[in-house]
Amino acid sequence: MRRRDFGLGLVLAASAPRVRAQEGAKQHRIAIVIPAGAAVVINENSSDALRRRFYQSFFAELRRLGDVEGQNLVIERYSGEGRPEGFANLAREVIGRNPDVIVAQTNPVALAVRAATGTIPIVWVGVNAIALGLVTNLARPGGNITGVSLYDAEIYAKRLQILKEAVPSASKVAFLTPRRAWEGIYGQAFQPAYQEASRRLQISLIPMLLQESTPSEYQRAFAEIPQQPPDAIMVSDIGDLFPYRQLVVELIEKSHLPAIYGNREYVEAGGLMAYGVDTGEAGRRIADDVHQILDGAKPGDIPIYQSTKFELVINLKAARGLGLTLPATLLGRADEVFE
Protein backbone atom coordinates (compact mmCIF):
# COMPACT_ATOMS: atom_id res chain seq x y z
CA MET A 1 0.00 0.00 0.00
CA ARG A 2 1.25 3.46 -0.86
CA ARG A 3 2.46 5.53 2.02
CA ARG A 4 1.52 9.09 2.69
CA ASP A 5 2.32 11.27 5.66
CA PHE A 6 0.08 14.22 6.39
CA GLY A 7 0.72 14.01 10.12
CA LEU A 8 3.72 16.23 10.61
CA GLY A 9 2.42 19.10 8.51
CA LEU A 10 -1.14 18.90 9.80
CA VAL A 11 -0.19 18.63 13.47
CA LEU A 12 2.15 21.58 13.19
CA ALA A 13 -0.51 23.55 11.34
CA ALA A 14 -3.01 22.83 14.11
CA SER A 15 -0.54 24.06 16.72
CA ALA A 16 0.31 27.34 14.95
CA PRO A 17 -0.19 30.43 17.13
CA ARG A 18 -3.82 31.52 17.27
CA VAL A 19 -2.80 35.06 16.58
CA ARG A 20 -1.86 34.02 13.04
CA ALA A 21 -5.30 32.56 12.47
CA GLN A 22 -6.85 35.73 13.82
CA GLU A 23 -4.74 37.77 11.45
CA GLY A 24 -6.07 35.65 8.59
CA ALA A 25 -2.72 34.23 7.52
CA LYS A 26 -3.30 32.21 4.36
CA GLN A 27 -2.52 28.52 4.65
CA HIS A 28 -0.91 27.07 1.54
CA ARG A 29 -0.78 23.32 0.94
CA ILE A 30 2.06 21.57 -0.87
CA ALA A 31 2.11 17.91 -1.84
CA ILE A 32 5.56 16.34 -2.22
CA VAL A 33 5.64 13.05 -4.12
CA ILE A 34 8.69 10.78 -4.22
CA PRO A 35 9.03 7.55 -6.22
CA ALA A 36 10.32 5.23 -3.48
CA GLY A 37 11.09 4.91 0.20
CA ALA A 38 9.01 5.97 3.17
CA ALA A 39 7.19 9.29 2.89
CA VAL A 40 8.64 10.24 6.28
CA VAL A 41 12.08 10.76 4.66
CA ILE A 42 10.74 13.98 3.19
CA ASN A 43 12.28 16.14 5.88
CA GLU A 44 15.54 17.93 6.59
CA ASN A 45 16.58 15.50 9.31
CA SER A 46 16.18 12.40 7.15
CA SER A 47 18.52 9.50 7.85
CA ASP A 48 18.93 9.22 4.07
CA ALA A 49 21.99 11.38 3.29
CA LEU A 50 21.01 12.34 -0.25
CA ARG A 51 17.48 13.37 0.70
CA ARG A 52 18.71 15.15 3.81
CA ARG A 53 21.03 17.34 1.71
CA PHE A 54 18.20 18.18 -0.71
CA TYR A 55 15.54 18.88 1.93
CA GLN A 56 17.78 20.90 4.22
CA SER A 57 18.31 23.33 1.34
CA PHE A 58 14.67 23.14 0.25
CA PHE A 59 13.12 23.91 3.64
CA ALA A 60 15.77 26.48 4.57
CA GLU A 61 15.08 28.41 1.37
CA LEU A 62 11.32 28.24 1.91
CA ARG A 63 11.77 29.66 5.42
CA ARG A 64 14.02 32.42 4.09
CA LEU A 65 11.26 33.36 1.67
CA GLY A 66 8.65 33.37 4.45
CA ASP A 67 6.99 29.99 3.79
CA VAL A 68 7.14 28.08 7.06
CA GLU A 69 5.69 24.64 7.67
CA GLY A 70 3.33 24.81 10.64
CA GLN A 71 2.68 28.53 10.17
CA ASN A 72 1.52 29.47 6.69
CA LEU A 73 2.42 26.16 5.05
CA VAL A 74 1.02 22.63 5.29
CA ILE A 75 2.99 19.85 3.59
CA GLU A 76 1.51 16.51 2.60
CA ARG A 77 4.04 13.74 1.92
CA TYR A 78 3.52 10.85 -0.50
CA SER A 79 5.62 7.94 -1.75
CA GLY A 80 5.17 5.59 -4.69
CA GLU A 81 7.06 2.97 -2.65
CA GLY A 82 9.15 1.91 -5.62
CA ARG A 83 6.17 0.60 -7.62
CA PRO A 84 5.94 2.53 -10.93
CA GLU A 85 2.80 0.61 -11.89
CA GLY A 86 1.01 2.41 -9.07
CA PHE A 87 2.14 5.95 -9.89
CA ALA A 88 -1.01 6.78 -11.89
CA ASN A 89 -3.30 5.85 -8.99
CA LEU A 90 -1.07 7.73 -6.55
CA ALA A 91 -1.20 10.81 -8.79
CA ARG A 92 -5.00 10.72 -8.79
CA GLU A 93 -4.98 10.42 -5.01
CA VAL A 94 -2.74 13.49 -4.71
CA ILE A 95 -4.88 15.47 -7.16
CA GLY A 96 -7.97 14.55 -5.15
CA ARG A 97 -6.53 16.47 -2.17
CA ASN A 98 -6.35 19.59 -4.38
CA PRO A 99 -3.02 21.03 -3.14
CA ASP A 100 -1.81 24.47 -4.20
CA VAL A 101 1.43 23.02 -5.63
CA ILE A 102 2.72 19.51 -6.29
CA VAL A 103 6.47 18.87 -6.03
CA ALA A 104 7.07 15.81 -8.24
CA GLN A 105 10.42 14.11 -7.87
CA THR A 106 11.75 12.15 -10.88
CA ASN A 107 10.42 11.94 -14.41
CA PRO A 108 8.05 8.95 -13.91
CA VAL A 109 6.32 10.69 -11.01
CA ALA A 110 6.07 13.99 -12.92
CA LEU A 111 4.65 12.26 -16.00
CA ALA A 112 2.02 10.50 -13.90
CA VAL A 113 1.01 13.71 -12.10
CA ARG A 114 0.91 15.76 -15.28
CA ALA A 115 -1.31 13.13 -16.91
CA ALA A 116 -3.71 13.46 -13.97
CA THR A 117 -4.03 17.25 -13.94
CA GLY A 118 -3.65 20.13 -16.36
CA THR A 119 -4.43 22.82 -13.82
CA ILE A 120 -2.70 22.22 -10.47
CA PRO A 121 0.85 23.68 -10.63
CA ILE A 122 3.65 21.08 -10.74
CA VAL A 123 7.26 21.74 -9.75
CA TRP A 124 9.37 18.91 -11.08
CA VAL A 125 12.93 17.77 -10.41
CA GLY A 126 14.41 15.30 -12.86
CA VAL A 127 16.38 15.16 -16.09
CA ASN A 128 16.10 16.02 -19.77
CA ALA A 129 12.60 17.55 -19.69
CA ILE A 130 12.31 18.12 -23.44
CA ALA A 131 13.45 14.65 -24.51
CA LEU A 132 11.09 13.08 -21.98
CA GLY A 133 8.16 15.12 -23.31
CA LEU A 134 7.45 17.11 -20.16
CA VAL A 135 7.91 20.46 -21.91
CA THR A 136 8.83 21.75 -25.33
CA ASN A 137 10.76 24.83 -24.23
CA LEU A 138 12.95 25.32 -21.15
CA ALA A 139 12.71 29.12 -21.15
CA ARG A 140 8.91 29.12 -21.32
CA PRO A 141 7.70 25.64 -20.40
CA GLY A 142 4.01 26.58 -20.68
CA GLY A 143 1.15 24.61 -19.20
CA ASN A 144 1.20 23.79 -15.49
CA ILE A 145 4.79 22.60 -15.00
CA THR A 146 8.23 24.03 -14.24
CA GLY A 147 11.16 22.90 -12.13
CA VAL A 148 14.80 21.86 -12.20
CA SER A 149 16.63 19.78 -14.78
CA LEU A 150 19.49 18.12 -12.94
CA TYR A 151 21.47 17.24 -16.05
CA ASP A 152 21.21 16.05 -19.63
CA ALA A 153 22.63 13.02 -21.38
CA GLU A 154 26.11 14.52 -21.55
CA ILE A 155 26.72 13.80 -17.87
CA TYR A 156 27.06 10.10 -18.67
CA ALA A 157 29.56 10.92 -21.38
CA LYS A 158 31.50 12.92 -18.80
CA ARG A 159 31.45 10.00 -16.35
CA LEU A 160 32.76 7.65 -19.03
CA GLN A 161 35.52 10.13 -19.82
CA ILE A 162 36.54 10.33 -16.14
CA LEU A 163 36.51 6.55 -15.89
CA LYS A 164 38.73 6.28 -18.97
CA GLU A 165 41.18 8.78 -17.45
CA ALA A 166 41.32 6.74 -14.26
CA VAL A 167 41.68 3.42 -16.11
CA PRO A 168 43.18 4.14 -19.56
CA SER A 169 43.23 0.43 -20.44
CA ALA A 170 39.47 0.06 -19.97
CA SER A 171 37.77 -1.00 -23.19
CA LYS A 172 34.64 -2.66 -21.76
CA VAL A 173 32.42 -0.90 -19.20
CA ALA A 174 29.31 -2.41 -17.59
CA PHE A 175 26.45 0.03 -16.94
CA LEU A 176 24.40 -0.94 -13.88
CA THR A 177 20.87 0.44 -14.35
CA PRO A 178 17.22 -0.64 -14.10
CA ARG A 179 15.88 -2.35 -17.21
CA ARG A 180 12.91 0.02 -17.36
CA ALA A 181 15.31 2.98 -17.50
CA TRP A 182 17.49 1.46 -20.21
CA GLU A 183 14.65 0.34 -22.45
CA GLY A 184 12.07 3.06 -21.75
CA ILE A 185 11.80 6.72 -22.77
CA TYR A 186 14.67 7.65 -20.47
CA GLY A 187 17.04 5.21 -22.14
CA GLN A 188 15.94 6.18 -25.62
CA ALA A 189 16.71 9.81 -24.85
CA PHE A 190 20.12 9.07 -23.36
CA GLN A 191 21.46 6.22 -25.46
CA PRO A 192 22.72 8.40 -28.36
CA ALA A 193 25.03 10.17 -25.87
CA TYR A 194 26.20 6.83 -24.46
CA GLN A 195 26.96 5.57 -27.95
CA GLU A 196 28.82 8.70 -29.03
CA ALA A 197 30.93 8.78 -25.88
CA SER A 198 31.68 5.06 -26.18
CA ARG A 199 32.79 5.49 -29.80
CA ARG A 200 34.97 8.49 -29.03
CA LEU A 201 36.60 6.84 -26.03
CA GLN A 202 36.85 3.43 -27.72
CA ILE A 203 34.77 1.79 -25.01
CA SER A 204 32.14 -0.92 -25.35
CA LEU A 205 29.25 -0.10 -22.98
CA ILE A 206 27.49 -3.25 -21.77
CA PRO A 207 24.07 -2.89 -20.12
CA MET A 208 23.94 -4.61 -16.70
CA LEU A 209 20.19 -4.54 -16.25
CA LEU A 210 18.19 -4.89 -13.06
CA GLN A 211 14.65 -6.25 -13.21
CA GLU A 212 13.82 -4.61 -9.88
CA SER A 213 15.63 -2.86 -7.05
CA THR A 214 15.98 -5.63 -4.45
CA PRO A 215 19.04 -7.16 -2.73
CA SER A 216 18.54 -10.51 -4.45
CA GLU A 217 18.45 -8.83 -7.86
CA TYR A 218 21.75 -7.04 -7.21
CA GLN A 219 23.26 -10.35 -6.12
CA ARG A 220 22.03 -11.97 -9.34
CA ALA A 221 23.41 -9.23 -11.55
CA PHE A 222 26.87 -9.38 -10.00
CA ALA A 223 26.90 -13.20 -9.98
CA GLU A 224 26.66 -13.04 -13.78
CA ILE A 225 29.66 -10.72 -14.19
CA PRO A 226 32.19 -13.55 -14.73
CA GLN A 227 30.33 -14.53 -17.92
CA GLN A 228 31.29 -11.21 -19.55
CA PRO A 229 33.89 -9.58 -17.29
CA PRO A 230 34.13 -5.82 -17.87
CA ASP A 231 37.14 -3.62 -17.12
CA ALA A 232 35.08 -1.18 -15.05
CA ILE A 233 31.52 -0.31 -14.00
CA MET A 234 29.41 2.82 -14.31
CA VAL A 235 26.50 2.94 -11.86
CA SER A 236 23.30 4.77 -12.75
CA ASP A 237 22.24 7.59 -10.45
CA ILE A 238 18.56 6.71 -10.80
CA GLY A 239 16.95 6.86 -7.39
CA ASP A 240 15.94 3.18 -7.39
CA LEU A 241 19.54 2.17 -6.64
CA PHE A 242 20.31 4.69 -3.94
CA PRO A 243 18.77 2.89 -0.93
CA TYR A 244 21.06 -0.06 -1.72
CA ARG A 245 24.23 1.95 -2.30
CA GLN A 246 26.18 0.15 0.45
CA LEU A 247 25.36 -3.22 -1.08
CA VAL A 248 26.27 -2.01 -4.57
CA VAL A 249 29.62 -0.68 -3.37
CA GLU A 250 30.38 -3.94 -1.54
CA LEU A 251 29.50 -6.09 -4.55
CA ILE A 252 31.68 -3.96 -6.82
CA GLU A 253 34.52 -4.16 -4.29
CA LYS A 254 34.23 -7.97 -4.27
CA SER A 255 34.41 -7.91 -8.07
CA HIS A 256 37.65 -5.91 -7.75
CA LEU A 257 36.54 -3.48 -10.45
CA PRO A 258 36.96 0.31 -10.60
CA ALA A 259 33.63 2.13 -10.74
CA ILE A 260 32.15 5.59 -11.11
CA TYR A 261 28.89 6.61 -9.48
CA GLY A 262 26.46 9.51 -9.83
CA ASN A 263 26.23 10.52 -6.16
CA ARG A 264 28.93 11.36 -3.62
CA GLU A 265 27.19 9.18 -1.03
CA TYR A 266 28.47 6.10 -2.86
CA VAL A 267 32.00 7.36 -2.31
CA GLU A 268 31.21 8.02 1.33
CA ALA A 269 30.12 4.36 1.46
CA GLY A 270 33.54 3.27 0.11
CA GLY A 271 33.16 3.65 -3.65
CA LEU A 272 35.98 4.89 -5.89
CA MET A 273 34.64 7.99 -7.68
CA ALA A 274 31.48 9.97 -8.22
CA TYR A 275 30.56 12.79 -10.57
CA GLY A 276 27.17 14.35 -10.08
CA VAL A 277 24.95 17.31 -9.39
CA ASP A 278 24.91 19.45 -6.24
CA THR A 279 21.55 18.38 -4.75
CA GLY A 280 21.58 21.33 -2.35
CA GLU A 281 21.43 23.73 -5.28
CA ALA A 282 18.50 21.78 -6.71
CA GLY A 283 16.63 21.98 -3.40
CA ARG A 284 17.01 25.75 -3.24
CA ARG A 285 15.82 26.22 -6.82
CA ILE A 286 12.76 24.02 -6.29
CA ALA A 287 11.86 26.08 -3.20
CA ASP A 288 12.18 29.29 -5.23
CA ASP A 289 9.74 27.93 -7.84
CA VAL A 290 7.25 26.86 -5.17
CA HIS A 291 7.40 30.30 -3.55
CA GLN A 292 6.82 32.10 -6.84
CA ILE A 293 3.77 29.95 -7.57
CA LEU A 294 2.33 30.51 -4.09
CA ASP A 295 2.76 34.24 -4.75
CA GLY A 296 0.66 33.95 -7.90
CA ALA A 297 3.13 33.19 -10.70
CA LYS A 298 2.09 30.73 -13.41
CA PRO A 299 4.41 27.70 -13.56
CA GLY A 300 4.48 27.81 -17.35
CA ASP A 301 6.03 31.30 -17.17
CA ILE A 302 8.88 30.22 -14.85
CA PRO A 303 11.94 29.00 -16.81
CA ILE A 304 13.15 25.50 -16.01
CA TYR A 305 16.46 25.81 -14.23
CA GLN A 306 19.38 23.73 -15.48
CA SER A 307 21.84 22.73 -12.78
CA THR A 308 25.26 24.32 -13.10
CA LYS A 309 27.06 22.90 -10.05
CA PHE A 310 28.65 19.47 -10.41
CA GLU A 311 31.21 17.81 -8.18
CA LEU A 312 33.88 15.19 -8.68
CA VAL A 313 34.65 13.20 -5.53
CA ILE A 314 37.47 10.61 -5.32
CA ASN A 315 38.30 8.00 -2.68
CA LEU A 316 42.06 7.33 -2.57
CA LYS A 317 41.64 4.47 -0.11
CA ALA A 318 39.44 2.66 -2.61
CA ALA A 319 41.99 3.36 -5.36
CA ARG A 320 44.77 1.85 -3.27
CA GLY A 321 42.61 -1.21 -2.60
CA LEU A 322 42.35 -1.71 -6.36
CA GLY A 323 46.07 -1.13 -6.88
CA LEU A 324 45.09 1.87 -8.99
CA THR A 325 47.27 4.98 -9.34
CA LEU A 326 45.09 7.88 -10.39
CA PRO A 327 46.55 10.60 -12.65
CA ALA A 328 47.58 13.81 -10.91
CA THR A 329 45.54 15.78 -13.45
CA LEU A 330 42.38 13.93 -12.41
CA LEU A 331 43.08 14.37 -8.71
CA GLY A 332 43.76 18.05 -9.33
CA ARG A 333 40.28 18.52 -10.81
CA ALA A 334 38.51 16.78 -7.93
CA ASP A 335 36.31 18.91 -5.69
CA GLU A 336 37.03 16.58 -2.79
CA VAL A 337 39.48 13.74 -2.22
CA PHE A 338 38.94 11.20 0.56
CA GLU A 339 42.21 9.87 1.95
Image: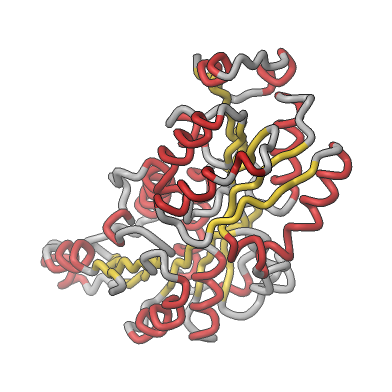
Tally of numbered tags: 0
User: Toward the viewer: 240 or 79?
Assistant: 240
Q: Is residue 30 left or right of residue 236?
A: left
Q: Where in the figure is residue 156, as x and y percent of width and height? A: 70, 46
Can residue 11 be seen in this snapshot? yes
In this view, 335 is above or below 78: above
Which quarter of the rendered picture does the N terminus lie within?
Answer: bottom left
- Residue at 53% across, 43% down: 222
Q: Quadrant of residue 313?
A: top right
Q: Is residue 292 left or right of residue 302?
A: left
User: Toward the viewer: 194 or 256?
Assistant: 256
Q: Quadrant of residue 213?
A: bottom left
- Residue at 50% across, 73% down: 122
Can residue 309 be seen in this snapshot? no
In this view, 170 is above or below 286: above
Q: Where in the figure is residue 210, as x and y percent of width and height? A: 54, 56
- Residue at 58% across, 68% down: 146
What sort of colour scheme is used for the picture? secondary structure
Q: Where in the figure is residue 279, as x and y percent of width and height? A: 51, 45
- Residue at 63% across, 38% down: 233
User: Toward the viewer: 296 or 61?
Assistant: 61
